[in-house]
Image: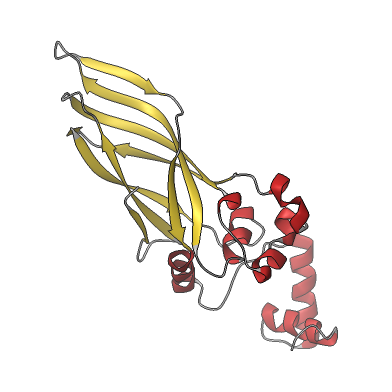
Amino acid sequence: MLGAEPVPHAVGPTMRFRLAARDDSGREVYSVALAAQIHLEPARRPYAEAEVERLGDLFGARERWPATTRPFLWSRVDVLVPSFIGATEFDLLVPCTYDHEVAGTKYLASLDGGEVPVAFHFSGTVLYRGAGGGLQIVQMPWEAPARYGLPVAVWRGMIESYYPSSGWVRLHADTLAELRRQAAERGLPSLEACVSEMLAERGRVP
């Protein structure tokens, strides 16, 4: 792992991870079709008390964390590494949802700073030039993961550039319809204004 940065002007929030591949055989590698499973590993970092409170809906009470903070899947992506001899570098583009019903988003949005422990698990197919010049194909088994500490500030900066001071919450169609009805009855200009007014009625808005 060489680094990570947001992809500017993508359709949606996308993180670019820069990776390196190495082959010491001296043969030409025609291509590598990689499948990557990307996991977050929450047990591999410390947490401030405010973070612990926000993460309660994911991991439960702090005393349960040794059992609940296990690695979980963040994303699955595929990438085709082009031809090289010896070594090469390539990009892995990872779309990042900001849906707060998704565990990965809940986790990342709850962190105040530091780094996010990320593990990349790879499998795939390698096409290379054999000893006699013919095409050879070999399958890559799942092996030890490549680990990386993604700065929380990098993720937050990416999200802020796409959703300034806002977020996404998925609602059932019936709930959304009722929210629209409430907004119309109250003469409010938006669903957000309706939610804010209802929360204020319950004394939940400062």
Residue 172 in sight from this viewpoint: no
Left/right of residue 148 with respect to residue 71 in the rendered view: left
Quadrant position of residue 109: bottom right
Q: Residue furthest right?
A: 202
Left or right side of 57 for 97: left
Residue 115 pos. (x, y %): 48, 60
Q: Quadrant of the C terminus?
A: bottom right
Number of on-image labels: 0
What percent of the width, then of the height, locates residue 33? 35, 32
Q: Which residue occupies 25% across, 44% down? A: 89
Left or right of 97 in this view: 123: left
Q: Left of 67 or right of it: where is 23?
A: left
Q: Residue at x 73, y 83 (%)?
A: 196
Q: Please determine whether, in this image, residue 36 is positioned above or below residue 150.
A: above
Question: Residue 191, percent across and down?
Answer: 69, 78
Give above or below for 25 relative to 163: above
Q: How is the image coloured?
A: secondary structure
For residue 202, what is the image quadrant?
Answer: bottom right
Front in this rendered view, residue 156 or 195: 156
**Does residue 103 show up?**
yes
Q: In the figure, 146 relative to 156: above or below?
A: above
Q: Nearer the viewer, residue 206 or 20?
A: 20
Q: Is residue 158 above or below residue 36?
A: below
Q: Position of residue 13 (x, y in %)?
A: 45, 62
- Where residue 170 sits, quadrant-wise, is bottom right
Q: Which residue is rendered at x = 72% and y = 67% of the image?
A: 53
The residue lying at 46 percent from left, 54 percent from top is: 95
